């Protein structure tokens, strides 16, 4: 079938029903074909949320496109994502490679047959070929870089591009591959076990990498700790379940925007009071937007904390405003925003008169920082 022989309306209909990986490969046919795809699929591309490279211990990333909830084509797909390619080490036993010029670099591709979407609502899977780009061991980044540059040209520089390192540590760990690419943000999921003892090298991973957009972590008790100035604490967002709230010491050293903590340990009220008072003084947490601290196994948190931090109160007869923000990074697709905080209690930062709402519900403390002075904040009250 020669696509160019059909009227534009037919061409568009055909392209509208093609998978993203097929559009990607078809765009290599010619400059005119690439132009046709990018122009005719503009609305479709706008339904994309981000491109994600998912890299585990194999260090051979899968590339996914993730979609907004309103993409009607994907209502059947529970995960709302589509695998568009993989980048792997060259396999000499395969003989079905073909060469493509990608951003000026000749790269060997082949097709594989694998479930394009891992989770769908029906018991059967769709098995469709998707492209696999290959690299020689010494040429990994020189292959990934032109592919990434092609994505930037194909999907646009306004698209978010994420590099996900998965399952970073355990009792041992692997050194993740983190390429130096434009418009790329880094996220990592990691686990630190009780017998983990190589904090020095783990610190080197963080110090040699860009600041992470998000870290998802489970941490057991350990005799090791992060340095107070570690890049770990500079991550924009941290989502953590920890045996003791002092490892990692997020309540003392976090420098990012949003943090979600589940702590199994006890005796936390004093540290929460210290956290709020340090924020109030302007000594720490200048970038903080939201904190959720949940105690999983302890007595209930008590509102006496409000007295210890010098909280102010909105009159009980009035309706306080609700603090809610888009999450910096959404590990769980169904939860787009931070928990709403509607509280009559608030605190004021001394350095700039900025307001934070503070709420305690049973075992959870919520802390939401407003981009408003106390005067402007009080104007929002009904």
Image: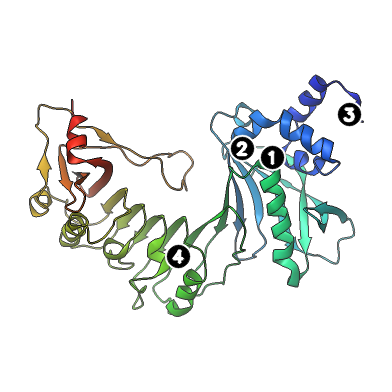
Residue 363 pos. (x, y %): 22, 49
Residues at marks 3 and 1 touching, judged by CB atoms closer than 8 Å: no
Whole-number angstrom distance, CA of label 1 to CA of label 2: 7 Å
Mark 3, residue position: 4
* Secondary structure type for disc 1: loop
Q: Which residue is mark 1?
A: 125
Tell me: 277 left or right of 25.
left
- Disc 4 is placed on an element classified as strand
Callout 1–callout 2 Cβ contact below 8 Å: yes
Residue 171 is at least partly visible in this image: no
Do labels 1 and 4 touch, CB within 8 Å? no
Q: Which residue is mark 2?
A: 120
Q: Which label sits on residue 191? A: 4
Residue drawn at point x = 66 percent, y = 41 percent: 155
Mark 1 or mark 4: name the one nearer the start of the chain.
1
What numbered label is drawn on residue 3?
none
Label 2's element?
A: loop
> CA gap, disc 1 to disc 4?
31 Å
């Amino acid at each position: 079938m020669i696509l160019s022989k059909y009227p534009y309306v037919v061409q568009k209909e055909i392209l509208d029903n093609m998978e993203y990986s097929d559009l990607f490969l078809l765009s290599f046919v010619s400059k005119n074909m690439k132009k046709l795809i990018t122009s005719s699929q503009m609305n479709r591309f706008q339904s994309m949320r981000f491109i994600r490279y998912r890299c585990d211990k194999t260090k051979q990333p899968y590339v996914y496109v993730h979609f907004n909830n309103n993409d009607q084509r994907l209502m059947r797909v529970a995960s709302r994502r589509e695998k568009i390619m993989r980048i792997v080490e060259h396999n000499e036993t395969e003989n079905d490679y073909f060469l493509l010029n990608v951003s000026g670099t000749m790269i060997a591709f082949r097709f594989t047959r694998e479930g394009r979407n891992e989770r769908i609502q029906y018991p059967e899977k769709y098995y469709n070929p998707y492209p696999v780009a290959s690299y020689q061991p010494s040429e990994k980044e020189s292959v990934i870089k032109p592919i990434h540059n092609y994505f930037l040209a194909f999907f646009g520089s306004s698209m978010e591009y994420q590099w996900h390192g998965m399952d970073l540590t355990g009792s041992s760990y692997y050194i993740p591959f983190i390429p130096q690419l434009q418009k790329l943000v880094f996220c990592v999921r990691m686990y630190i076990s009780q017998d983990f003892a190589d904090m020095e090298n783990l610190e080197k991973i963080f110090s040699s990498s860009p600041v992470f957009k998000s870290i998802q972590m489970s941490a057991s008790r350990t005799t090791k700790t992060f340095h107070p100035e570690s890049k770990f604490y500079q991550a924009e967002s941290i989502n953590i379940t920890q045996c003791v709230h002092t490892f990692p010491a997020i309540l003392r050293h976090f420098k990012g925007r949003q943090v979600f903590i589940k702590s199994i340990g006890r005796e936390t009220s004093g540290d929460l009071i210290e956290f709020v008072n340090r924020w109030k003084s302007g000594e720490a947490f200048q970038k903080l937007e939201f904190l959720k601290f949940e105690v999983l196994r302890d007595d209930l948190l008590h509102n006496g904390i409000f007295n210890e931090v010098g909280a102010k109160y909105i009159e009980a007869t009035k309706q306080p405003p609700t603090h809610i923000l888009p999450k910096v990074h959404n590990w769980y697709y169904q939860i787009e925003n931070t928990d709403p905080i509607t509280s009559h209690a608030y605190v004021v930062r001394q350095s700039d008169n900025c307001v934070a709402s503070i709420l305690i519900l049973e075992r959870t403390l919520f802390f939401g920082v407003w981009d408003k002075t106390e005067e402007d904040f009080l104007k929002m009250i009904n």
